[in-house]
């Protein structure tokens, strides 16, 4: 169910790699066509399905996008939620939405990844013993 071509997927993957270079935080992107429930509930479901809650510092971030239903969410794990102010992701979502409104999904996602990486650096800087705990590939779901 690849919604993005290989070049677009590679661009998103490289954005994740670049964002994670300066933070111990882990960023994943999950894409599907339809979201049949509340978007935050759906994102949380995939967050757990992708084992994002199993990072050492509980500092995973999921960017979830339902392309056909035009819904998206950004959620962070418990470690992030303890460290950051309320409504932490609101500005990131607004910057992504500026691209989404014009049909630029990949650009919006890449923007969100870059901002997430910059913000995570403040709270979860890269550590010498840091390792990539989660895949940087885009995950495509189909209502699982």
Image: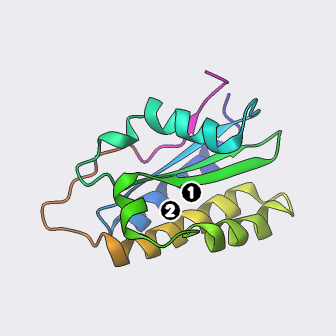
Query: Do residues under tags 2 and 1 come within 8 Å of each other at their CB atoms?
Result: yes
Task: Characterize the magenta stretch by its predominant secondary structure.
Answer: loop
| Front-most of residues 128 and 124 | 124
Q: Is residue 115 above or below residue 144?
A: below
Q: Is residue 10 above or below residue 83?
A: above
Q: Which residue is mark 1?
A: 11
Left or right: 130 with respect to 60? left
> Which mark is nearer the camera, 2 or 1?
2
The kind of secondary structure element at disc 2 is helix
- Residue 95 locus on image (x, y percent): 70, 72
| Front-most of residues 7 and 28 | 28
Which residue is outermost to the top?
Answer: 144
Q: Is residue 34 above or below residue 4?
A: above
Give the magenta-colored segment's residue range.
136-144
Image quadrant holding the C terminus, namely top right
Q: Residue at x 58, y 47 (%)?
A: 9
Q: Is residue 82 above or below residue 91?
A: above
Circle 2 residues within 10 Å: few <14, some 14–19, many ≥20 = many
Left or right: 68 with respect to 18? right
| Residue 139, image quadrant | top right
- Residue 4 locus on image (x, y percent): 68, 43
- The reply to whether the magenta stretch includes residue 58 is no
The kind of secondary structure element at disc 1 is helix
Labelled disc at residue 15 = 2
Left or right: 104 with respect to 137? right
Labelled disc at residue 122 = none
Q: Does the image show residue 22?
A: no
């Amino acid at each position: 169910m690849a919604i993005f071509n290989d070049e677009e997927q590679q661009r998103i993957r490289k954005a994740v790699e670049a964002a994670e270079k300066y933070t111990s935080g882990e960023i994943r992107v999950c894409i599907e066509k339809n979201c049949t429930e509340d978007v935050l509930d759906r994102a949380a479901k995939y967050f757990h399905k992708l084992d994002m809650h199993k990072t050492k510092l509980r500092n995973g971030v999921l960017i979830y996008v339902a392309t056909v239903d035009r819904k998206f969410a950004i959620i962070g794990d418990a470690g992030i939620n303890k460290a950051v102010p309320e409504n932490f992701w609101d500005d990131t979502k607004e910057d992504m939405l500026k691209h989404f409104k014009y049909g630029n999904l990949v650009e919006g996602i890449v923007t969100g990844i870059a901002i997430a990486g910059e913000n995570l650096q403040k709270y979860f800087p890269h550590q010498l013993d840091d390792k990539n705990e989660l895949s940087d590939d885009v995950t495509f779901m189909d209502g699982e």
